[in-house]
Amino acid sequence: GLVMSTKARPRERRATVMFRNVLMRAARGLRSEAAAETDAFANKLKFNFSIPTATLYDKSPVQMVILPGSSGVFGVLKDHVPTIAALKPGVVAVQEVEGDSELKQFFVSGGFAYVKPDSSLDIQAVEAVPLDELDVDEVKKGLASYTNAAASASDDVEKAEAEIGLEVYQAMAAALNVA
């Protein structure tokens, strides 16, 4: 059989000690990263917001998010009760910093919000557009077009499609304060 020389053992011990030191440094690094994340979210909500083509917020610490729920508008702060809510067309408003009166606003055509027990909020929306990027004239045209389509629909499918478009354009008009 293979017999190790006594000279190889000190090298093995050094390798073991080096490996243990590397592991300890890595563990300290992971603990400090976890502590930094805990500090970042101390009084904040962990916010994730995505659409099929992009991620708008990814584990971002925010103060509050206001959502257009299907049962009404509601706000989510840290330690909100866990819930799942369908979103109707409307504005998602994000307060990133406490006391900041300027909210980042996005128009969503619908989606879902998941408030989790770990004070995180995930929003998945079909579409989301920064509110300031909506064109008032295009919203007025779309509103008129879908109003006419709903009034002149000849069957249930046309009527349902027109009513969905009308609901979205009415919500956009309301968000932009367009009469």
Image: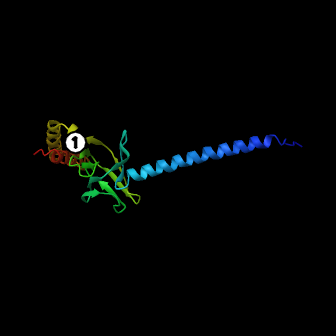
Give the percent coordinates (x, y) of residue 27: 56, 48
Residue at (80% x, 40% y) in the render: 8
What is the quadrant of residue 143 in the picture?
Answer: top left
Residue closer to the observer: 55 or 126: 55
Q: How many labels does the image show?
A: 1
Q: How crowded is mark 1: few (under 14 residues within 10 Å), some or many (20 or more)?
A: some
User: In the displayed image of the protein, which residue is found farthest to the left?
Assistant: 179
Q: In this view, does 44 lie above or below 53?
A: below
Q: Estimate the x, y position of residue 56 in percent, counting from the top left.
A: 34, 42
* Mark 1 secondary-structure assignment: helix
In the picture, measured across the screen, residue 73 lies left or right of residue 45, that is left
| Residue kind at label 1, given as amino acid type | Leu
Residue situated in front as seen by the camera: 92 or 104: 104
Give the x, y percent position of residue 64: 29, 53
Q: Where is residue 171 in the image (x, y as percent from the top left)?
A: 19, 48
Q: Mark 1 points at which residue?
A: 131
Instruction: Using the image as rendered, state which of residue 131 and residue 118 is in the foreground.
Output: 118
Front one among 143 and 12 = 12
Residue at (31%, 55%) from the top-left corner?
A: 86
Q: Which residue is drawn at 27% across and 46% down?
A: 109
Farthest residue toward the right? Answer: 1
> Residue 140 falls in which quadrant of the image?
top left
